[in-house]
Structure formats: C-alpha cells, structure tokens
Amino acid sequence: MEKSGPKMRTDTKLVWAILLASCSSGAIVGRSEMQECVFYNMNWKRDGTNHSGVELCSGENEKRLHCFSTWKNRSGSIEMLKQGCWLDDVNCYDSNECVERKENPDVFFCCCEGNMCNGKIHYNPEAVQSTLKPVVVKPETFPTLLYSLLPISALALLLLLSFWMYRHLRLSYPPLLLASQECSLGSGSPLLAQKPIQLMECKARGRFGCVWRAQLLSQTVAVKIFPIQNKQSWQNEYEIYNVSGMKHENILHFIGAEKRGNGVDVELWLITAYHEKGSLTDFLKAHVLSWNELCVMAQTFVRGLAYLHEDIPNMKDGHKPAIAHRDIKSKNVLLKSDLTVCIADFGLALKFEAGRSAGDTHGQVGTRRYMAPEVLEGAISFQRDAFLRIDMYAAGLVLWELATRCTAVDGLVDEFCLPFEEEAGLHPSMEDMQDVVVHKKLRPAFREQWFKHTGMFLLCETMEDCWDQEAEARLSAGCVLERITSLQRSTSLLVSPHLLSNLTPPSKEFSL
C-alpha cells in the first residue's frame, strides 16, 4: 500500500495535465488575427504573381492563420517551390518552426504559426523507436488493482473526450474518395488526402456546377464543384471514372472525389487533370486550324469516343463495359497542350454490362442542339447500340465545328458558330430543334470550297454518315477513326478535275 501512494499522485498529476492541455487547446481554436509570411512562387511568371516578398494573411472568424513552405531536394540542394499563407490546418497548430517530419518525401512540406515563421525550413524525420519495456503485473491484493485501474480508466475517458473535442472543433478536411489506394500525382508523392486543395480561379460554369483551377502543392489540378442538389450527377460521374479500364489518354484523367462542408453548405468535388487551353468550343472561338491540326484533334476525339464505346473483356484491372456519353459536344471536349483532346463530363453517361438493363434512364437528356432526331422525338430504343448511335450523331456535329475553322481551303474562314446557331439561335427550345432536325431534316451547311480538298471532301462524307436521319445507318466510332486515319495520309493532294466531276455535294435535305 505504501508503494501505491506515489504512483497515485503521479497518475493524478498526469490526468490533470491532460485535462488542462485539452481545455487550453480547445480554448485557443478559433482565434483569428493578422499574420505575415515569407512569400515565394517558382512559377510566378505563369501565375502572374510576385517572385518573392512578404504576404499579408487575413483570416476569417473561427479560423487560424499559418505559413507554409514546399520544396524539393535536388541532389542535396534545395529547390524552393512555394511559400506563403496557408489555410487553417490542425497539423500546423502551436508549431513556431517550419519542420517536415516525413521520411524522404518527393515534395517536402511544412507549416507553422507566427510571423515569418516559414523563413527557415527544417527537415527532421521522426524515427520510430520502441523503448517501452513490458510491465510485469505482480499478483497484488484487490485494493491495489483497483487503485491502479482507476487512473487508467480516467485517462482513457479524458483521451476520448479530447478526441471528441478535436473532431468537432477542427477545420474539416475530409479524406478523398480515391480512385486507387495510392492515387498519387507522381512517383513517391504523398497520398492526396494528406494535403488540402486551394481553389485559385473559377474557369467555367455549367448547369451541374462550376470548374476551378486549383493548386495541390506544386501540381495544378481542376476541381469541378457540384451543389448538393446535383448529387446524382456527381455520383454518376464518380462511378463512371472508376469503371475498370477508364484510364485512356483521350479520356480526362480522374484524380479523386470528396464531400466538403456540412449541412446545407455541402459541396461535392471531382478532382481531375487540368488543361490550360480549355474546351474545344473556347479554343475554336479564338483560333483557326491548319489541316494537320484539324486531323490531330478529330482523330484523338474519335479515338477517345471509340474507346469509351468499346466493350473490352479480360483487361488487367477487369472488364471494361461499353459506355455511352449522352452529352457529346465541343464544350465537353478538352484540349491538351499538344493539341490532342480528351473527353470530359460523364454526369449523364451510361454503362452497359452483360445481363443488366440500362436502368430507369430518361431518354431526352443532353444539350438540345446536339440531340439526335430520335431523342428530339422521344422515340429511343433503350438498347446499348441505340445510345451509342446518339453519341455518333453529336460527334458528326463536333467534326463540323472543327471543319468550319480550318484553313485547308482557299477563302476566308468563317467566325466560329455552333451547330444550328443560324437557324435556331443561341438558346433553342425543344420545339425549335424538332422543327429544324426532325421535320425539315436539315443539317449544318458545307462550304463549296471544301469539296476542292480531298481530305475535306472525305470528312464531309464522314459527317453525313454520322448524322444520318436513320440511326441504324450511322457509322460506329471505330469506323470513323479508320476513315480519319486514312484521309490524313492523303491530305496534301487536291482533288483532280476529273474526280471533281464525279463528286456530288451533300443532298439538300442535309444542308442549311
């Protein structure tokens, strides 16, 4: 009994110390004040910022202010990437020095509290050491065991209380629903869920949400944000991106998804690769294309669509089912830096698995001006091939948009114009499109000069075969890919006068 007295007093002091630490940590959460941080941006020219200096941070109520630094180790020398203000992050609390503690990360990261605390950076990896010795419990009397267990129980209760306070008071950075357990941005990079994403600039807004350029350490990414009322579209797009075999160079690269906020303020995020040139629509408004550029864009667009439509068994990561996009348009085709393209926006997509129906899907979805005749009439056969043919009709219209901005033939290039814009306006109703496409059976017009260029002539034929009034007569994406690949090889030749006499322009019912 005499031996248990000092132990009880030591345990009691430990309990009070933990209680005071929990209370004091809870009391300081939520402070907000002005703070200065060392600022540096390696990509200052591209981002339009200062190269270096001092950044003044201002926080919101209930949020704390921090500074951060990120750098890389280049053969023993430090290459600084960025420095500046950081969001409220529990990992930075009460740290007045900027210290990276991970073992050999690809990108070093540290954060701290206090003015200019990121001016000096430290690398001090935590070593895992096992110094605990097994405790041998000698048989004691019942009172001794009771006195020993009481402080341990109280300590466990306090730890649970501290954890509860931490969960409810900290700024919420929920983990990402990653496409894979090691979804990383580069070799050796940390899991995405370990670092928050900072939104930089809103790039586009649509009916389902808005798209932001965002920063994930030194990596620029795109974040598509859905309001909670569009949860179904977010959920569907997330599931499509996670279908087996959905990694393809002409399909937008998916990084992860997450929920942000609480209650009515919940936002649903999709994180993907970022492409600076934006959508095909935006690019064509500001640029004209050479014949070679047109072929590269058309070929990679159709290659992505053909892969999407293809049913591929026995892949490394499983069976890839055929997928119908259901909202093909130039706005949903993104341009990469090398002028190849990738298909994006799978909020309306359908996958077709053997033995399973397409489900209770609505036929009249998509963008009105790109809707096929059978969609406008509400006469869709809910079979796989019917949905794939709807995609091919819209693909023909996208190819026409590319052709209208090509400089391969003589004469001025027209200003960019959406399909049926002249006939139905910028915001056509369903009735407007039914009148133009179904009743009058019209299609976008071909310029007379196009028939004087071998490649353009063959491309016009391909467009006609894509947007045929009869769905069963339309080309498949694989067939269109073969045609475009072959016509690209013969692009430098002009059609001879003899051949021109045998070529007939598209029928009048297919011209505006």
Image (spheres, grey):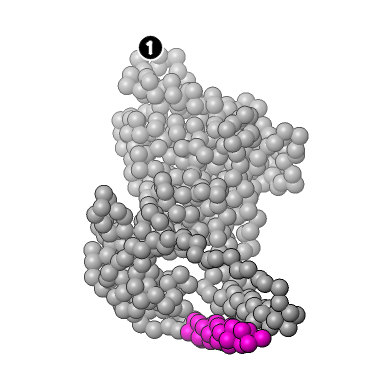
Query: Per the image, is 493 magenta?
Result: no
Q: Main secondary structure of the magenta part?
A: helix
Q: Is residue 382 left or right of residue 498?
A: right
Quarter of the figure with residue 485: top left
Residue 505 visible in the displayed image: no
Residue 171 visible in the displayed image: yes
Secondary structure of residue under mark 1:
helix
The residue depicted at 68 percent of the width and 34 percent of the height is 384
Query: Looking at numbered disc 1 in the image, what kind of residue is underneath it?
Result: His
235 shown above or below 328: below
The residue depicted at 27 percent of the width and 65 percent of the height is 40
Q: Position of residue 288 (x, y in %)?
A: 33, 40
The residue depicted at 73 percent of the width and 38 percent of the height is 382
Which quadrant does the N terminus fall into? bottom right
Return the residue nearer the eye: 408 or 486. Answer: 486
Q: Position of residue 475 (x, y in %)?
A: 57, 26
471 shown above or below 434: above
Q: Position of residue 227 (x, y in %)?
A: 58, 63
Q: Which residue is mark 1?
A: 498
- Bounds of the magenta span? 1-29
